[in-house]
Amino acid sequence: MLKIRNLHARLADDGREILKGVDLAVGAGEVHAIMGPNGSGKSTLAAVLAGRDGYEVTCGTVRYFGRDLLAMPADERAREGLFLAFQYPVELPGVNNMYFLRTALNAGRRHRGEPELDAGQFLRAVRAKLKELDIGEDLLQRAVNVGFSGGEKKRNEIFQMAMLEPRLAILDETDSGLDIDALRIVASGVNRQRAPDRAIVMITHYQRLLDYVEPDRVHVLQDGYIVESGDKSLAIELERRGYGPVGDAA
Amino acid sequence: MSAIVDFPVKPEARPYLDSALGSAGEPDWLVRHRRRSLARFAEQGFPSRRGEAWRYLDLRPLEQSPLPPAAAGGRVSPAELDGIVFADAAYRLVLVDGWFAPELSTIAPLPAGIWFGSTMAALDARPELVRDALEISAIDGDRSFSALNGALFSDGFVLDVAAGVVLDRPIEIVHFASGAIPSSLHTRSLVALGVESRVRLVESFAGSGRYWRNDAVTLRLDAGAELDRVILIEEAADALHFGDVGAVLGKASRLDGFALLLGGRTVRHEVTVRSAGEGAHCGLYGAFLLADRQEANIVTTVEHLAERGETREIFKGVATGRAHGAFQGRITVRPAAQKADAHMLSRNLLLGAHAAIDTKPELEIFADDVKCSHGAAVGDLDEAALFYLLARGIPHDQARRILVEAFLREAVEIVEPTAVREHLLSRLTRRLAMLEE
């Protein structure tokens, strides 16, 4: 589904190289965790995959279902089923949540040649998912993320993911800033999204989330490339020994 | 025919000197007032761009092709007002080309304590009130277009509300231009609210063809009175609109004004408030959306003269294409106006390399115990917000449109009651959709 080969990327404004040769392959139905210390390039990797401005890919390729992902604009990537759950979800004053989500959903449906949902159909679809994530219906009438607590914002990201049903979901530090109850809700929301035709990549600093969402593969990103990969036991080991200097891991 | 006059005349004023001054049978004081006003206009001519107050608008097209005052009798069918009118109005007064159109208006039966009608009718029903308002505003300075208005106004509306009277449903005034002949429309109106009375006004300006609207309104709020006034400017694409509002606020009175500028080639919306009574509240809000070669200029001047006055101003603007918007806001706090609390904010979106927005908030403070601030910003759409929409699959153009609409909707959200707010939002959405095509 996703094949990253020797990916190098730098910041467009000061030219600083952040990703220095990332290799990663994610197959359908798999859940991967990418761990690493602050500043290792985790969020940059998520941003580059989602197509955010401000980064230059200087080397390497990213294939998504065989297509060149980097050649697609951000909105097209999303319509092709790539979803990024933001580390810091953006507040959109004046944009109603329900309108926002229906517009996004219908953009994807149009792209796939499916009929658009009208307000009534959409509302029925929404209600079921809201319940699963323990989100009140009043959320729909509010402006996107405006006045939401940190936990509500993260839950809203997972709610959007549940509605948009992506093929590849990248969760950028979705666990950060959550108390244990919110973490459980978010984690069960993610677990419900596990499916044979869907891949999930969780970017996280801590092993905590992995107690609730069990990954198939764990990777350690350090200083711009993946220094170590393993199964879920690697996460437990990392928790014990911490992120050492590059090279020590072996 | 050329008028023979005994006062100096600026060349651009000359074409207006032959105009008939008012209608037959007007009281002597008004005839004198019109003559004085005309002389004042003739001496001053058009406002100069060299002065601060008019520096942002280009008046040359108006100088080059003068627009004579509109005659009465312009025809407008009720169907033409569809959409423009506010459906939930308690009363509606329609002015066509600046003349009262009784067949399109619904102004009776009025509750006790409210007088509402055309300015011409008020000359009979409320002569002192009208005379006071005209003669007082005539002395305040160098406003040449207001002087021309004083000389030439055809009609307008007067709302006189007695002490303690409260009307919750909005009163509507529709200013419509029939567009039959290129012309100037001069309207003069007055709102006088008695002690602790409360009303809401919705005024809309629209039309077709080429015209110059020169509208002047006086607002007088007695102690504890409350006025909510919403104006919606949807003038024709070729029209000029100069609106001049002068307000005097009594003790603990509340004025809240909202202006939505959507249509017109050149629009100037000026509000001058004398916050004269202790603890008066003045809220001035608004938004403009400009495209093509539209120009808009919002000018506010609030003068605090008494203690514990409060002023809130928030104006938002969007300019695309080759449009030019400008906000000039000034709050003055006089020495006696201790404990004034005044905030002014101007936020603007500049879309495209050829659009321009100027913003100039100013505070002038002569008292020492005050809380005053201002802020201004001009920028492009927020990159993080745009990416958030893109990352959800919303196509680029649609994402930009959603953010522009959200920016302006947020400005309108402040309007009460819901029915008026929804009316403004639907007009805004319609205008945005038109710009899409």
Image: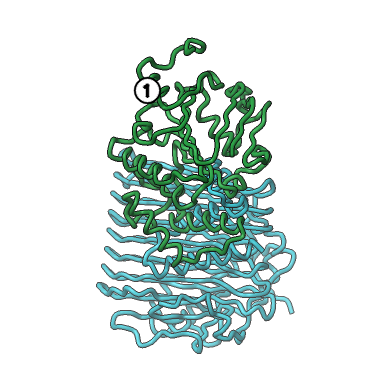
Residue B376 in the image: above or below residue A113: above
Q: Chain of mark 1?
A: A
Q: In percent of the image, x 39 and y 34: which residue is there?
A: A214
Q: Residues within 10 Å of mark 1 (few under 14, many from 20)?
A: some
Q: Point out residue A183 in the picture as x, y percentages from the top left corner.
A: 33, 38
Give the side of residue B111 with respect to residue B382, left or right.
left
Q: In percent of the image, x 43 and y 46: which residue is there?
A: A193
- Identify which amino acid the numbered label 1 is placed on: Ile
From the image, state the color of chain A. green
Q: In percent of the image, x 50 and y 28: which residue is there?
A: A42
Q: In percent of the image, x 57 and y 68: which residue is there?
A: B234
Q: Point out residue B326 in the picture as x, y percentages from the top left corner.
A: 57, 51
From the image, state the color of chain B. cyan
In the foreground, B322 or B284: B322
> Which residue is disc 1 drawn over?
A236
For the N terminus of chain A, the quadrant is top right
Q: Point out residue B64 in the picture as x, y percentages from the top left corner.
A: 74, 64
In the foreground, A139 or B123: A139
Residue B223 in the image: above or below residue B50: below
Please say whether residue B360 is visible from this viewpoint: no
> Label 1's element?
helix
Residue A71 in the image: above or below residue B291: above
Q: Point out residue A91 in the picture as x, y percentages from the top left corner.
A: 44, 45
Residue A177 in the image: above or below residue B188: above
Seen as rendered, the residue at the extreme bottom is B103
Query: Toward which corner of the image does residue B364 lie, by quadrant?
Result: top left
**How many dots with numbers?**
1
Please say whether residue B241 is visible from this viewpoint: yes
